Image (cartoon, rainbow, N blue to C red):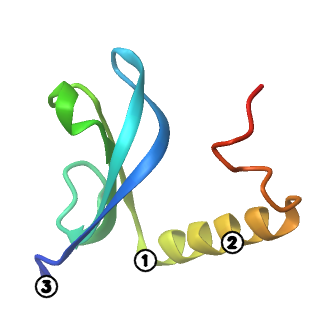
Amino acid sequence: MCTYVTEQRDIEGSAKGARGWFPASRAMVYVDHPQHAPYAHTLNIDFLDPTAGPGARVAVELTEESARALAEAIGAALAAAPPGLASRDQTV
C-alpha cells in the first residue's frame, strides 16, 4: 500500500553522491515502492540539495525493521555524545 505521505525537513549537513560531496539541505522520508531494493515497499529517505538539481541527491531504501533500527541507533549515538557535540556551532 502506498501512503503517498511524505515528511520533509530542512536539514544542515553534507551528503556524498555520484559527483562527490554536496550540501544536504532537505530530507524527504516516505513509504513507497522502492526503485532498487528487492521488497514490495520500503521506507525511503532522500537527502538532497534542491537548488543543485537531481545530481545532488542520495537515496536510501530500508525495510521497516532496518529503518526502526537506524532511528534507534541515531538516538543512541546522540544520547551518548556530550551535549552540543553534533551542533553546527562546532568546527574542526
Q: Which mark is residue 64?
A: 1
Q: Disc count in the image?
A: 3
Q: Residue tagged by mark 2?
A: 75
Name which of mark 1 and mark 3 comes first in the sequence.
Answer: 3
Other residues around mark 3 within 10 Å, as few (<14) / some (14–19) / many (≥20): few
Question: In front: 43, or 53?
Answer: 53
Q: Please name the amino acid that badge 3 sits on.
A: Met
Question: In front: 64, or 30?
Answer: 30
Left or right: residue 79 versus residue 11 is right
Q: CA distance from mark 1 to mark 2?
A: 17 Å
- Classify mark 1: helix, strand or loop: helix
Other residues around mark 2 within 10 Å, as few (<14) / some (14–19) / many (≥20): few
The answer, for residue 40, to whether it is visible in the render is no
Q: Please name the amino acid that badge 1 sits on.
A: Glu
The nearer-to-camera label among 2 and 3 is 2
Other residues around mark 1 within 10 Å, as few (<14) / some (14–19) / many (≥20): some
Left or right: residue 40 versus residue 2 is right
